[in-house]
Image (spheres, helix red, strand yellow):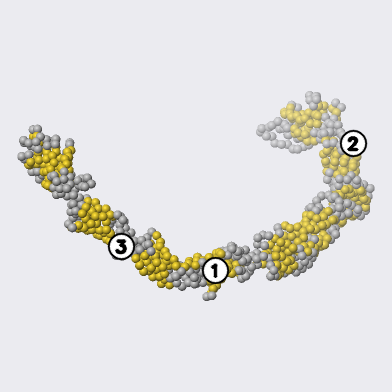
Amino acid sequence: MNILRMDGVKWLMIFVSLGICSQTAAQSAIQVSKFSATSKTVILRWTKYTGATSYRITAALKSSPNVPVAFSTFGTNTVMGSISSLSQSVTYIFTIEALDGNQAVLSTASIETETAPDMMDPISGVSSKDSRALVADFNLKTGATYYIIRVENANGFFREDAVLSSPAEIKNLTPYTEYSLSIMAANNGGRSQPSLPVTAKTALPPPQLSTSSPSNDSIVVTWPPVAHAVQYTVSISMFDFSSEMNYNTSNTSLTFPGLDAGALYIIAGSAWDPEGRNGESSLNISQKTRPPTPSSVNVSVVMSNNAAGLLVYWELSQEVYGTIEYQVASDHNQTCNSNSTSCTLSPVGCGEVLTIQVTAFNEAGPSCPSTPVVFITFPCSPDSLALVQSAGGNCTLMWNTVPYADSYRAFITTGDGSEETCNTGINCTYSCQCGYTYLMSVLAYNHAGSSPPGKVLNHTTLPCCPDSVSVSAVSTDTLEISWAASRGAILYQTQAADSSGVVLCNDTASVCALSDLTCDSSYSVVVMPCSEISGCNHACEAHTRDTAPCMPTNLNVSPKTSTSVSVSWTANNRAATYTASADGGSSRHTCTTPGSSCDIADLSCGSAYKFSVSAASSAGQSLPSYSVSLETEPCCPASLAVEQVTVAMTNISWSQANGAHSFITSLTSPRGHARCHTRDSHCLMGCITCGTNYTVTMEAFSLSGLVSNCTYQGFSSSVCCPSGVRLYAMSGDSLRVYWRSTDSSHISVTELTGSRSNYTCTASPGENSCDVEHVQCGDVYHVVVAPLTPEGSKVLFCPQRLYSVTCSGSNVGTGESEIYSCKLVFSPFKCPASWRMLKKNTLNPV
């Protein structure tokens, strides 16, 4: 070490030989950095520069960077050096220069740094914050940005803590241990030398408290022993109360008596060391006392979902902290839990005696159980019901007694929904009517309520006898019995009895027909209602009814005249009126007698009758006897008409005739006769002679061959027509019509009908010609000569002839004129191709 003095400044130079580094081909500028600093000295480090034979460090204040205040030089192999005699907490600019052998600068570099503060005064005071922390008080140092507290103990423990200000807390120490503490001021430049040390000891650790509440008015605190402790202090206070009680003890447990039940207490403790220092206090521990004992316990019966339970409810004598849970228990091993002041034990049965207690719970444990409450549940229902029915319409329900029952109530419900109750001892008498189903039950009662529904006794009385019974005969062997439906009956048994036996009918309806009974007999009829449960009521009233008379037999019908018959039969009834009837035609004919025969008159022609006989009495009417059929002669048609359609042919028609199936109609005269046989109501008859009077007769036949002879008004055929009709041309424009007359007693009329004009002429009786004036020539005429009937009508069946009248000068048919004629019968006129020509003014038909 060389110490040089320059301008009154002492320089301390430290040379460090690091060896010679090999020269590189490409060399960078010199680099410098701070290694460490104190309040008076700064140590720098730099990089070796090739070719440098020495290095020079100069220091200048940052405020005067061009005025060096100190320098140091170092040999060629030195890369670290110090510069001293600096001021504390001052910022300097340090410059490193690499020099060659001629002291020329090869490379340079600068760095700015601060010197550390001066050594501080010793720590002024140390106190124990807790068992693992100390609090140090010290004076602050100008120029220091933070502080370093060095902590050591005799066991080799060493640690430095950086702090920013005073007082400073030193944590994570060992309890009840002595430590040596010194402090250093520090800034960006470094730290000061440690101050003189001071000693301090940490406090005892806190006791690890455990608490419990053995009863609802005490708390027990225990803890393991704390090393080096000579005494303990335990404090206790109620939550939300400011007052606190402290207790000192040298033991490791403590009991606090006389506390409030169900209250929350805050507990803490500390240990004292031999030096009389109170150690670290434990964390506050919350501990509740056990809850108070529930009081005023009451019990009642409740029902839920058809199950019985016991509602237990109670009170607490004082307010408590927090939530209390309750448990209700019975000596029948039934429990329930609740956080309110009620709870239900379920299920419970009838006739039970239970001892019930309530216990409160909190985090500290259970309270003392409440005073036991003995509770008797509702009684059981009687299970041996019996019924006695008396003849007077009363029923008595009886039952046995059951334990713990104070009273009984019987319930009698009828099928119509009505209900009757009675509160008696062990029986109940009520009116039981017919046709009802009675449901009977008994409930027992005590202070807890009624028994559960027990046995239901079902008793059905006999169905009631039906009212409004009606017995009527619906036929000779059948009685119809109807009645009003009776209460309680689901089936009716109806019987009818006479001297010969009994007839039965079973039906669910309120009507029944008893058939195959004996006619003209007296029956006793009874309707007995029945049910499946109680059977049939055989005490119902009987009704007497006679059946209708028996049917007459051996019917015989004998004709007396064409419109009357005699009817006879065999009468076989006790007392009856007989009616014989004839059914047919459009009406019914009867005769009535109490005997065995009568006559029926005024029967209709052409009718088929069925004869039968029936008997009647007050009991009804018999079946009609087997019928006998009888047919009367057919009727003649009421009207007949003869119409002549041609000279020799007529059409005969007639009205309908009952019973007539076919007809033979005859026209008879001295000159001959005509006849037709038909099933129709008309016929066409030929071979009629003109001018003849005919007799008209008819025979009407039935299907069975019965015949009626019918006579009608005579018929006269039409007058005979003239023959040999000729036309003769007269002078001028006149024509004469000539004929041969067959009857001289009738007027004859001649008609000429042309296309342009018509002409007529009339001949008196006996004449056989007539003249027609002013006939227009050049036309064809239809010529008819017909006689008139006595009534003045023209005979329609006379033949018609056709004549052609030509013109010859001013005369008809003269000169060169020709007259042609042809004969037309029953058809429109059409002349043949060849006509015979008549000349010399004579007109004759071909």
Discs 3, 2 touching: Cβ within 8 Å? no
The reply to whether residue 282 is visible in this rendering is no
Residue 121 disc label? 2
The percent position of residue 529, horizontal first and vertical second, equals 60, 67
* Image quarter (top left, top right, bottom left or bottom right) of the N terminus: top right
The reply to whether residue 469 is visible in this rendering is yes
| Secondary element type, mark 2 | loop
Q: Amino acid at mark 1?
A: Arg
CA gap, disc 1 and disc 2: 150 Å
Residue 26 disc label? none
The percent position of residue 204, horizontal first and vertical second, equals 89, 48
Q: Is residue 780 left or right of residue 288?
A: left
The percent position of residue 77, horizontal first and vertical second, equals 75, 35
| Secondary element type, mark 1 | strand
Residue 702 disc label? 3
Classed neighbour count for the residue bearing mark 1: other residues with Cα under 10 Å, few (<14), some (14–19), many (≥20): some
Q: Earlier in the sequence, mark 3 or mark 2?
A: 2
Classed neighbour count for the residue bearing mark 3: other residues with Cα under 10 Å, few (<14), some (14–19), many (≥20): many
Q: Earlier in the sequence, mark 1 or mark 2?
A: 2
Which residue is drawn at the image coordinates 80% and 55% (left, top)?
313
* Image quarter (top left, top right, bottom left or bottom right) of the C terminus: top left
Q: Earlier in the sequence, mark 3 or mark 1?
A: 1
The answer to which of 541 and 34 lies nearer the viewer is 541
Which residue is drawn at the image coordinates 34% and 61% (left, top)?
605
Q: Amino acid at mark 3?
A: Ser
